[in-house]
Amino acid sequence: MGATLAIGTVIGLLLRRGAALRRARTKPEEGGAVQVTGADLGEGLGERATLVQFSTAFCQPCRATRRVLADVAAMVPGVAHIEIDAESRLDLVRRFGVMRTPTVLVLDAAGRVTRRASGQPRKVDVIAALGEAIGDRPA
């Protein structure tokens, strides 16, 4: 009984520890990667990549996520950070299957979702995901 409780606690802590940016899953009926445009988001996409953050007004981790994404976007040329109010954009929440805030999407230059995370991501994970989204394209 005690071992089961200990294992459950460890698993719970690992899941809460932070959100790793996972590869975006595509739905077979869509025939490829999920794609978004600046018009969908109400703002222009970044020249090289875009960090999209779904937030709500009273979400504490959303504030920290905003700082992390803004710092990374300022550090990497051609990267934009767009924050979406999940409560006012239910169309996008449904489209991207956002179940909690913050949720972060990493878009490549064409607007394809390459990575996503639910919960507060670590700065190092965001930078790694951006490196993958940008690839070897020059600035």
Image (tube, rainbow, N blue to C red):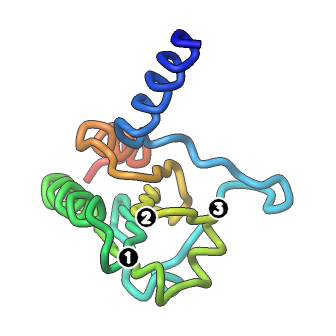
Label tally: 3
Q: Residue placed at 35% from the left, 59% from the top?
A: 48
Residue topped by disc 1? 56
- SS at badge 1: loop
Front in this rendered view, residue 60 or 37 = 60
The answer to whether 128 is drawn above or below residue 111 in the figure is above
Front in this rendered view, residue 12 or 80 = 12
The answer to whether 27 is drawn above or below residue 13 in the figure is below
Give the Cα separation between the discs numbered 2 and 1.
Answer: 7 Å
Q: Which mark is residue 34?
A: 3
- SS at badge 2: loop
Residue topped by disc 2? 101
Q: Residue 112, how many percent across, how many down?
A: 55, 60
Q: Residue 84, how many percent across, how many down?
A: 40, 78
Q: Residue 68, how many percent across, how many down?
A: 20, 55
Q: Residue furthest toward the right?
A: 29
Q: Residue placed at 32% from the left, 80% from the top?
A: 57
Amino acid tagged 3? Val
- CB contact under 8 Å: marks 2 and 1: yes
Looking at the rendered image, the disc whose residue lies closer to the viewer, 2 or 3, is 2
Q: Residue placed at 32% from the left, 69% from the top?
A: 59
- SS at badge 3: loop
Residue 73, located in which quarter of the rendered image?
A: bottom left
Amino acid tagged 1? Thr
Of pointers 2 and 3, the one earlier in the residue sequence: 3
